[in-house]
Image (cartoon, helix red, strand yellow):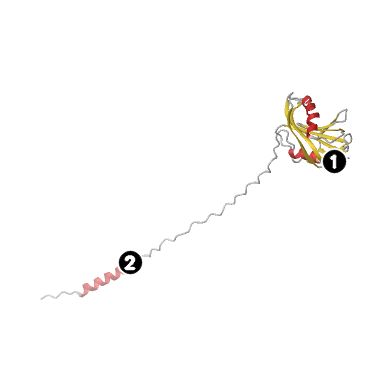
Amino acid sequence: MRLTHTRPLVSLVIAGAALAGCGASSQPATSPPIKVAPATPAPVKVAPPPPAPAPTESNPAGDIPDSQVYVTYRYDHGGFTVKVPEGWSRTQKANGDVSFTDKLNRIELSGAPAATPPTPQSINAAVVPSLRAQVHGFTLGRITTVSRGAGPAVLVTYRGDGPVDHVTGKTAHDSFERYVFFKNGHQAVVTLSGPTGADNVDPWRTVTDSLRWL
């Protein structure tokens, strides 16, 4: 019977396995990939918008601006003083009446002796017919009594054609306010006019509220 020698074979198998293990360990280990966070972009500085320009005051035709300056005018012929817009053209008639004009607006001053204070009834009877004859396109508004700095006054409102424009040859339809004041046998008349639709409530109030007797 022939004996088989197995020890050398086992030794060779073990040696081969050892060599195989040594060969595997000689290979470099693979490191996991390093994750790099994306760079954060620097914030972009945006210049602030320029400040909005201040609103420009819009003055429709005939509107007296809020910035208008007033000066006191002494009307010796009428015996009173009154504030009028600075810079307006002044015209004096032969009978002593004075007017101030600027573009489309007008202020007229007059004075005369009077025996009694005016009333809406007396103005309607004595003044309105004269206005109707003098003012082209006359349309009567109201006749009322109002209070102003110098005391009560009778106010007549009406409409009519204004002066003819020397450049265009046309005329505008104006609104009129006629105030009649009275003191010690004398009356003062202040007539204000401008294009219909113009907002001159405050300027006209400034003028009529400023009247003072001398």
- Residue 124: x percent and y percent? 78, 30
169 to 179, vertically: above or below: above
Residue to which mark 1 is pinned? 212
Q: Amino acid at mark 2?
A: Ala
Give whichever of 82, 131 is nearer the camera: 131
151 to 15, vertically: above or below: above
- Residue 133: x percent and y percent? 78, 24
Tell me the distance, in whole angstroms, between the alpha carbons under discs 2 and 1: 120 Å
**Image quadrant in which you'd find residue 108:** top right
Circle 1 Cα neighbour tier, 10 Å, few/some/many (<14 / 14–19 / ≥20): some
Give whichever of 187, 162 is nearer the camera: 187
Mark 2 / mark 1, whichever is N-terminal:
2
Residue 181 in sight from this viewpoint? yes
Identify the residue at horizontal 19%, vertical 74% (top origin). 6
- Residue 32: x percent and y percent? 40, 62
Residue to which mark 2 is pinned? 24
Give whichever of 200, 145 is nearer the camera: 145
Q: Are marks 2 and 1 in contact (CB under 8 Å)?
A: no
Name the secondary structure under disc 2: helix
- Residue 184: x percent and y percent? 88, 38
**Image quadrant in which you'd find residue 211:** top right
Q: Amino acid at mark 1?
A: Arg
